[in-house]
């Protein structure tokens, strides 16, 4: 199993490393997690981390990438940091592996 996500009964919890103020939004591969073991998906965001704008854009980018409604993207932890854990409700490990 990949080190950048965990499958739960609710769905898949992704380790995410946000890269705000990027020139182009989108997923940018798997990178080492900051300050911990494992890996994370790097997500580039145009927004600055001010007033929740980057988090809002992160939800939009992940929902678009995995073709799910924004309401099915939920923060589990790290809303104020660059490293976050995000639940993709209803997805499975097989669904996630299909995006590689």
Image (cartoon, rainbow, N blue to C red):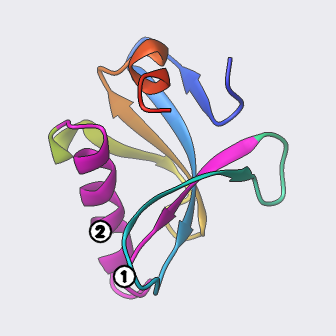
**What residue appears at the point 43 percent right and 11 percent down from the top-left corner?**
9
CA gap between label 1 and label 2 equals: 8 Å
Please identify, in this view, whether the residue under mark 1 or under mark 2 is nearer the observer.
1
Rendering coords of residue 16 (x, y %): 56, 52
Tag 1 near tag 2, CB within 8 Å: yes
**Residue extent of the magenta highlight:** 39-68
Position of residue 16 in the picture relative to residue 76 (left or right): right
First-in-chain label (1 vs 2): 1
Name the residue carrying label 2: 57
Name the residue carrying label 1: 46
**What residue appears at the point 42 percent right and 32 percent down from the top-left corner?**
99
In the picture shown, does residue 67 fall above or below 45? above
Rendering coords of residue 93 (x, y %): 49, 17
Rendering coords of residue 39 (x, y %): 73, 44
Could you tell me which quadrant the N terminus lies in?
top right
SS for callout 1: loop
Position of residue 85 in the picture relative to residue 56 (left or right): right
SS for callout 2: helix
């Amino acid at each position: 199993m990949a080190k950048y996500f965990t499958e739960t009964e609710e769905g898949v919890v992704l380790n995410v490393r946000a890269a705000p103020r990027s020139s182009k939004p989108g997923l940018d591969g798997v990178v080492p997690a900051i300050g911990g073991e494992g890996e994370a998906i790097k997500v580039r965001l145009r927004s600055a981390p001010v007033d929740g704008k980057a988090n809002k854009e992160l939800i939009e980018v992940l929902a678009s990438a995995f073709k799910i409604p924004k309401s099915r993207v939920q923060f589990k932890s790290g809303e104020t940091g660059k490293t976050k854990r995000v639940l993709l409700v209803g997805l499975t490990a097989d669904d996630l592996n299909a995006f590689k």
